[in-house]
Image (cartoon, rainbow, N blue to C red):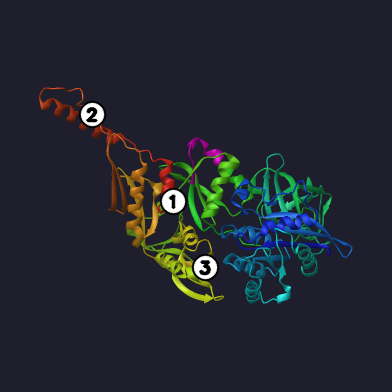
């Protein structure tokens, strides 16, 4: 055990985590020259295209130091706030963390957020200044920021470059010297923490775990404590670039288990594995269940594909434990799922993965957050979908979730950012100058206001320099109204939204104008209305296509033409009573992009 080191890499988006991980793998000869490529650990096409890490990736390396062989288990983690659950799970399986800071950008919001997660788990922090090869690097200035943040000595900060390989050997030596070896009892009953799982169509579900106490061998009879299921360990091994089978996985090591599990409900991330004959007494306290921040409905474009979508969601949840979903039906869209996401990027990635990995075409409804509704009878409801809202006459008040938002930016953009936050009903809590031109501002804001386009606007205002991080702080009472969209007097439930009363008129008008552009013309007038309760607050009309029924009348009396027009009018009236208006999928997506 004293030759094992478990560590993860934490940083803000685009500070060079995956590039540095590539260099570590090359220096330790884990990856041969033939296998080497950019972002070795990012196995998804999506990750490569976007240049971001979406999933945590575990890999084992061997390194010789002072004539002794060490085993290093590295977990590369995502940097985006929407994937912070991946980071928290990785941290639970480690004893040390490499804190990477971009020498050209300095400390950003997500750096601080991930660092606090690591400190909570008592991890040994190794600060590293990356991208030292760039001419725009500001090493002394950024070192001051790191010292102020974690209180380390200046000489403890390692200088490195993921691109050129500068300082990589020094990083590996520091990991061996500073990161503690795992603590555990090899003779105690088996206790292993599951921190991830994947679905393999040939071998079933593969669970990744860290052995805290005891050891696990091939052929052992094991039990998953939370699900109370028992299995045979058909194969155990370690995670190299490909899975490498072993006879036994010892205390402190990270490995995988294949035991022929077929359904995703049988594996729960955060569960504890133990032996059936000699079980451990208690489960490992690791990390809490995920709390989704943004909710949206996902429906198959073709209602017959519902069952396929359900299977796809199960497999996807296995690979992404932060996705939550439950069954939902809509009058407009049929059967589907109400899904909980950690943020808008998370929602976009899930949509994209459903399309690429499972070939599922889906419609996503307007994203919203979870509200609390208090009725006059003293009952309390959680409202995840605007259609669940009771009659306004019975509502006493509604509470909406608030977040504590932390924005770090260049001083030049502070005015525009404050205006954006105040327009989104934010309340300024604090403003600190970290250096002469870097400012940290904190706001209390409603989560519902940042769900749509806040992050995009923040990036464009600050030319990409502002970094944003948030955490949930509780519910507060608010003046909210349910906005319904009606087509010819029929409510389209998939377009309903809960919105602050001050913003309702503008929002309703925008939706009506957008739908007018997108809904195809019919043989009759289509009225598009936005309503709060019974009060119509905005209206647009898609004019009817007109067939010229008088074309065949040439000459003769006007009464002949009038007779034909009256007949057409009656027909249109009858058609309007039975006619349905199809809402194209583009219209649902357009609501998400109202400000484009």
Name the mark nearer the viewer: 1 or 3. 3
**What residue range appears in magenta?**
298-309
The residue at 61%/54% (across/down) is 52
Residue 32 screen position, x and y as percent? 79, 49
* Circle 1 residue: 592
Give the quarter of the image for residue 549.
Answer: top left
- Point out which mark residue 548 bears: 2
Q: In this view, does 548 lie to the left or right of 406?
A: left
Which residue ends up furthest to the front in the rendered image? 135
Determine which quarter of the picture holds residue 144.
Answer: bottom right
- Which disc number belongs to residue 407? 3
Q: How far apart are marks 1 and 3 (CA)?
A: 24 Å
Which of the two discs, 2 and 1, sits closer to the camera?
A: 2
Q: Percent from the top left, x then y, of residue 324?
A: 56, 52
Regarding mark 2 in the picture, which secondary structure is present there? loop
Residue farthest toward the right in the current orientation of the protein: 67
Disc 2 crowd rating (10 Å Cα; few below 14, some 14-19, many 20+) is: few
Does 307 appear in magenta?
Answer: yes
443 left or right of 580 in image: right
């Amino acid at each position: 055990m004293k030759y094992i080191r478990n560590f993860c890499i934490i940083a803000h988006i685009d500070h060079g985590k995956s590039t540095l991980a590539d260099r570590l793998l090359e220096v330790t000869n884990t990856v041969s020259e033939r296998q080497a490529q950019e972002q070795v650990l990012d196995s998804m096409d999506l990750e490569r295209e976007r240049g971001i890490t979406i999933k945590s990736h575990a890999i084992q390396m061997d390194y010789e130091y002072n004539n002794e062989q060490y085993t290093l288990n590295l977990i590369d983690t995502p940097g985006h706030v929407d994937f912070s659950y991946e980071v928290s799970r990785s941290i639970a399986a480690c004893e040390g963390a490499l804190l990477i800071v971009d020498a050209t950008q300095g400390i950003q919001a997500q750096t601080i957020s991930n660092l606090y997660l690591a400190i909570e788990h008592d991890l040994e922090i190794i600060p590293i200044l990356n991208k030292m090869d760039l001419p725009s690097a500001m090493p002394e200035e950024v070192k001051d920021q790191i010292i102020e943040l974690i209180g380390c000595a200046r000489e403890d900060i390692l200088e490195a470059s993921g691109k050129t390989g500068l300082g990589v050997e020094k990083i590996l030596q520091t990991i061996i010297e500073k990161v503690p070896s795992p603590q555990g009892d090899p003779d105690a009953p088996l206790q292993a923490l599951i921190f991830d799982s994947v679905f393999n169509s040939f071998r079933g579900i593969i669970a990744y775990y860290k052995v805290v106490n005891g050891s696990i061998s091939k052929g052992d009879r094991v039990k998953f404590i939370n699900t109370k299921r028992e299995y045979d360990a058909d194969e155990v091994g370690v995670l190299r670039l490909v899975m490498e089978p072993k006879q036994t996985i010892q205390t402190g090591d990270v490995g995988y288990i294949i035991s022929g599990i077929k359904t995703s409900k049988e594996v729960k991330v955060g569960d504890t594995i133990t032996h059936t004959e000699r079980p451990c007494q208690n489960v490992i306290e690791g990390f809490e269940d995920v709390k989704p921040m943004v909710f949206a409905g996902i429906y198959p474009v073709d209602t017959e594909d519902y069952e396929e979508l359900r299977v796809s969601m199960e497999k996807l949840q296995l690979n992404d434990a932060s996705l939550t979903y439950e069954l939902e039906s809509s009058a407009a869209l049929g059967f589907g799922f109400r899904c909980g996401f950690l943020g808008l990027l998370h929602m976009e990635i899930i949509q994209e993965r459903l399309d690429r990995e499972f070939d599922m075409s889906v419609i996503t409804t307007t994203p919203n957050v979870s509200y609390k509704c208090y009725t006059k009878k003293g009952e309390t409801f959680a409202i995840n979908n605007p259609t669940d809202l009771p009659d306004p006459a019975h509502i006493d008040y509604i509470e909406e979730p608030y977040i504590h938002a932390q924005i770090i930016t260049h001083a030049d953009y502070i005015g525009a950012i404050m205006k954006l936050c105040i327009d989104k009903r934010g309340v300024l809590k604090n403003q600190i100058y970290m250096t002469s031109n870097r400012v940290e501002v904190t706001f209390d804001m409603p989560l519902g206001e940042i769900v749509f386009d806040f992050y995009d606007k923040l990036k464009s205002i600050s030319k990409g320099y502002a970094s944003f991080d948030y955490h949930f702080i509780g519910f507060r009472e608010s003046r909210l109204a349910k906005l319904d969209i009606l087509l010819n007097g029929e409510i389209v439930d998939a377009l309903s939204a809960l919105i602050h009363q001050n913003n309702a008129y503008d929002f309703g008008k925008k939706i009506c104008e957008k739908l007018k552009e997108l809904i195809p013309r019919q043989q009759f007038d289509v009225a598009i209305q936005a309503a709060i309760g019974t009060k119509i607050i905005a209206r647009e009309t898609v004019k009817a296509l007109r067939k010229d029924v008088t074309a065949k009348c040439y000459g003769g009396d006007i009464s002949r033409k009038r007779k034909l027009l009256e007949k057409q009018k009656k027909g249109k009236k009858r058609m309007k009573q039975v006619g349905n208006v199809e809402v194209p999928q583009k219209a649902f997506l357009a609501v998400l992009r109202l400000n484009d």
